[in-house]
Structures are given as C-alpha cells and as structure tokens.
Image (spheres, rainbow, N blue to C red):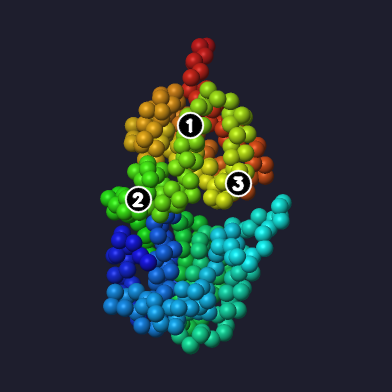
Amino acid sequence: MIFEWQAGLWQRVLDSAGRMPHALLFAGPAGGGKRDFAEALAARVLCARPGPDGHACGGCEDCLWRIAGNHPDLLRVIPEADREPRDDTPEKPEGGKAASRQIVIEQIRDLQQALTTGGHRGSQRVAIVDPAEAMNLYTANALLKLLEEPTTNVLFILISSSPKRLLPTIRSRCQTWAFPRPAGEQAARWLVERKTPDAASLLAFAGGMPLAAAALAEGGGAAGRKRFVTDIAAIPGKAPLRLAGEWEAWLKGKESLAAGFDMNTLVSWMQRWIADLSSLRLGGPLRFFPAEHDILHRLADRMTIDSALACYNEINQARRVAQHPLNARLFLEDMLLRYARHFARAAAPAVRK
C-alpha cells in the first residue's frame, strides 16, 4: 500500500525496474508512510507476477506467503519492543525486563546467517531494517559489513526518521530516497476520508504527518493531548513537583502502557509546546498548537526571548535521555522545574546597582 503523496516515489520504483541498487535508505519525518512504502516495494520485488501498476498481484504463492507473514525471503530487523505480540506469546511477568527499543547485534548476526543460505527459489530477497537509527555502534558496524560485501540478489531497505544519526559509511553505501512532508491539503483530505476526529488539531500536533495524526486518534491521543495542554498551561501557577507526580502516575497507567505512551513521547510533546512558545516570542507562527493560540500568547508574554530559547535548548537536552531516565520521577521534576523557572526569571524585576 502506498499513499497518494508517494505517487512520485512509486514512479521512481517503476522507472528503476531491473536497475534497483542493493541498498536503499528511506529518509524522512516519522508518520509519513515510509514503512508502508517499504512493504509495498518488498511485495513487488518478491511477487511472481506484479500488475501493470507495479504492485504485487496478491494472488501468487509468494504473495500468499507474504500476506500470511511466512515468506522466507522477506527478513525484517526491528527492535523487540516494536514486534507485534502473537497469541501464543507468554505474557511478561510483572517487574520483568522491558523489551529493548534497540536493534541488537545478535539480530544482524541472525540476518547474516539467513543470507548465507539460498533464497526460496534462488530469486530476490529483501531485508528491511526499521528504524535504522535504533542500531548502536556495534550493530551498525556489523550491518556495514553486509552492505560492503552484499550477497547476490538481496535488497536492503533501511528506514530512518533521523538519518544523520546513522554512520556516514552506512549512508554512503545506500541510495537515499527522501520522503518529504506531505502537502497539507493531501494530508488533511486523507484524515477526513478516514473520518478522523479533530483531524485539523491532531495533524498540526503531529507536525503535518498524517499517519502520526491517525495513530494519535486511534490510541487516545486526542484525550492525552487535551490533558497535556490543561496540565502544562497551569504552570507556573501549579506546583511543578505536584504535576511531576501526576505525570508519573499517568505514564504508569494501563491506558498509557497499552497505547505506547511513554516518557519519550511526553518529552516530545513538551518539545513541541516550548517550540511554539519560542516561535511566538520571535514573532513566528504556531506550528503544533494553533488551537491553543490564546493560552500560548498569554504564557509567551511572561517569557523573554532569551528565556524561551534557553528553555527550548534545555528540553532538547532532556530529550536525549528521555528514553532511559535513571529515575522517572526525578527526571519529570527536573524538567518541569526548569520550565517553571524560566517564567520566574522573566517576571523578576531587574536589580538596580
């Protein structure tokens, strides 16, 4: 499946028929459909008789295996945390180790082992690495060896929302295909056709990325966004330490865990909120929270430009460790206290000497 805003890229696939490089890097913002495009390309490559539009037929033996999730020549390398649980997978005991969000070196070794054997019919095989930036240095170097000495008839597809985090040597071994942000009208129309509630606000909140907006709507993101705005707009009047405790409980709630709402997501929301505050102080537009125009203007008036920019830099630093904070409560307290202090500094009168 591809989306209407990817028509030009799909034409590139058709024009490259028979001349596809051994490794592709799909780079672009999250929520634009890179993974869907990669799956559509893999389906075409493995299909015995693609249709006139270039898409897999959906009826040959290879397509049936792929649809059933059993095609031996379609290899996916993804973090354990991103794998869909199967019905026969035992539940993790309470207090057990959380699933890794990294692609570990053992997965690349397994991929290498799988590629040493012949393909199902001696034909093309496809290996999808998603997200490629989830590899650490050791894992990335292991993959680099596979890219430098490619096995015959293997197409590597690396998917990344942060391609600059990849090793330059990996990027140089791949042909990069840029997946730009969809046009606003296309993204909005797609959401309306899906009958997505509060589509305009969620699309803005998702940075104009339609699939990210749809995922927010399906995962209860609209309610979460509303709560976030209510909570963060109460600072500096509301005690930051109290809010930190409430947010810690929020993150641990069953609904948040089921929806994949974690610390990294919450900090990214803070990032967007402060980005809009900074934009207002610099005379720019609201990008993520246009519906909260009045609230943000009121708060921005209480910050200096220097405070707004310093606050933005601090939240960017916090984002780097949000994935694995040593203590969630202390992390939230520190983040919210820093945010509140910028209002205090801006409001404090100058001391005369």
- Amino acid type for the residue under numbered disc 2: Lys
Within-10-Å neighbours for mark 1: few <14, some 14–19, many 20+: few
C-alpha separation, residue under disc 2 versus residue under disc 3: 26 Å
Within-10-Å neighbours for mark 3: few <14, some 14–19, many 20+: few
Front position in the image: 108 or 138: 108
Q: Residue at x 39, y 80 (%)?
A: 59
Q: Residue at x 52, y 14 (%)?
A: 351
Q: Secondary structure at mark 3?
A: helix
Compared to residue 349, the image places residue 290 above or below, namely below
The residue to which callout 2 is attached is 195
Mark whose residue sits in front, 1 or 2: 2
- Amino acid type for the residue under numbered disc 3: Lys
Front position in the image: 103 or 352: 103
Compared to residue 344, the image places residue 157 above or below, namely below
The residue to which callout 3 is attached is 254
| Residue 96 in the image, given as x and y percentages of width and height | 71, 55
Front position in the image: 97 or 11: 97
